[in-house]
């Protein structure tokens, strides 16, 4: 196990226990989430070492790495995905009309394949071998890690870099943010979507909240810590957007973890309440952050 000794947001070494969460997807093991006493940032600590972390992604139910439509959760995920793909393309194109795009942690490459069809030059990074194989069928220039991008694409800068529920997985945060800083065009846009642990559905489900997703999710963000982290890396926040479907999907999984069954009515009610409460506070279940260079 790897024990983080300093907070990646503020550098403090003083933490306190926050929650103990179970990995319901793969291992059934429990993991500690701690809170930085200085800035309040939450993170999984300790966590599995990088040499074994990949084992915790080996499950057909890990939907971002599969095109399986077995089961009601996967069916609903894929039904919503078709709509959200169009929304993502519209969002990116509202900041940069067209150009080069890097989808960092591209999964099976569905987003890259869709945005390629409207004229973008696509690049992707995906460490999972099985997901990357599928991604290469959907898009061009898909690599296994950022080092290979550095090696094979030496002088390319991107008009847009996107991370759709990926930053919470990143194990080498300073190096990754530095890579984005160096590879994003001066007028480019960095778009990061992450779960929000202060949303109503997170508060309601507590340790059963599916978006904690330990140990795959190492970092657990909200607006304050996300903005602080990216500010230190040289980016300024331009705008935020809600991901309103996430509260329903996450509540559906959370309900299953908490009760052992998928109660669609209960999950829908919690998801709806989460979105309604977030209308004033902007604390949606997941948030998209749009950054540019300072």
Image (cartoon, helix red, strand yellow):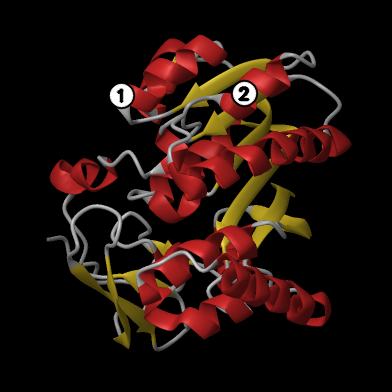
User: On the image, numbered disc 1 is attached to which residue?
Assistant: 129
- The local secondary structure at tag 1 comes to helix
Image point (32%, 24%), residue name: 130
Q: State whether residue 150 is above or below residue 213.
A: above
Q: Nearer the viewer, residue 176 or 22?
A: 22
Whether pointer 1 and pointer 2 mark residues with C-beta atoms closer than 8 Å, the reply is: no
Image point (62%, 17%), residue name: 122
Residue 7 visible in the shown view: no
Separation of residues labelled 1 and 2 (CA atoms): 17 Å
Residue 11 placed where, x, y %? 38, 73
Residue 119 placed where, x, y %? 78, 13
- The local secondary structure at tag 2 comes to helix
Residue 103 visible in the shown view: yes
Image point (47%, 83%), residue name: 40
To which quarter of the image does residue 147 belong? top left
36 horizontally vs 85: left or right? left
Q: Nearer the viewer, residue 175 or 26?
A: 26
120 horizontally vs 205: left or right? right
Q: State whether residue 130 is above or below residue 152.
A: below
Residue 2 placed where, x, y %? 16, 61
Q: Nearer the viewer, residue 172 or 24?
A: 24
Check disc 1: other Cα within 10 Å, few if <14, some if 14-19, many if 20+.
few
270 horizontally vs 120: left or right? left
Numbered-mark total: 2
In primary-sequence order, the first of circles 1 and 2 is 2
Check disc 2: other Cα within 10 Å, few if <14, some if 14-19, many if 20+.
many
User: On the image, numbered disc 2 is attached to which residue?
Assistant: 112
Q: State whether residue 23 is above or below residue 275.
A: above
């Amino acid at each position: 196990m790897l024990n983080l000794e300093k907070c990646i947001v503020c550098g403090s070494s003083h933490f306190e226990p926050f929650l103990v969460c179970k990995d319901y997807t793969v291992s059934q093991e429990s993991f500690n989430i701690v809170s930085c006493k200085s800035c309040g940032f939450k993170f999984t600590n300790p966590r599995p070492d990088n040499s074994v972390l990949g084992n915790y992604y080996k499950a057909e139910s890990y939907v971002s790495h599969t095109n399986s439509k077995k089961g009601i959760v996967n069916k609903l995920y894929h039904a919503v995905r078709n709509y959200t793909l169009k929304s993502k393309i519209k969002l990116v194109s509202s900041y940069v009309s067209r150009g080069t795009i890097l989808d960092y942690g591209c999964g099976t490459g569905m987003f890259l394949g869709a945005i390629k069809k409207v004229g973008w030059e696509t690049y992707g990074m995906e460490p999972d071998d099985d997901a990357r194989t599928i991604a290469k069928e959907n898009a061009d220039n898909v690599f296994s890690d950022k080092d290979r991008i550095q090696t094979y694409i030496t002088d390319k800068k991107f008009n847009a870099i996107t991370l759709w529920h990926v930053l919470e997985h990143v194990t080498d945060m300073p190096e990754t943010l530095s890579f984005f800083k160096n590879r994003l065009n001066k007028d480019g846009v960095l778009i990061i979507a992450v779960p929000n642990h202060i949303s109503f559905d997170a508060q309601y489900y507590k340790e059963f909240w599916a978006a904690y997703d330990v140990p795959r999710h190492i970092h657990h963000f909200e607006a304050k810590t996300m903005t602080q982290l990216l500010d230190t890396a040289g980016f300024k926040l331009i705008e935020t957007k809600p991901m309103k479907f996430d509260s329903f999907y996450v509540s559906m999984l959370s309900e299953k973890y908490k009760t052992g069954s998928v109660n669609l009515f209960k999950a829908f009610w919690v998801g709806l309440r989460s979105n309604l409460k977030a209308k004033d506070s902007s604390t949606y279940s997941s948030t998209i952050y749009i950054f540019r260079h300072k």
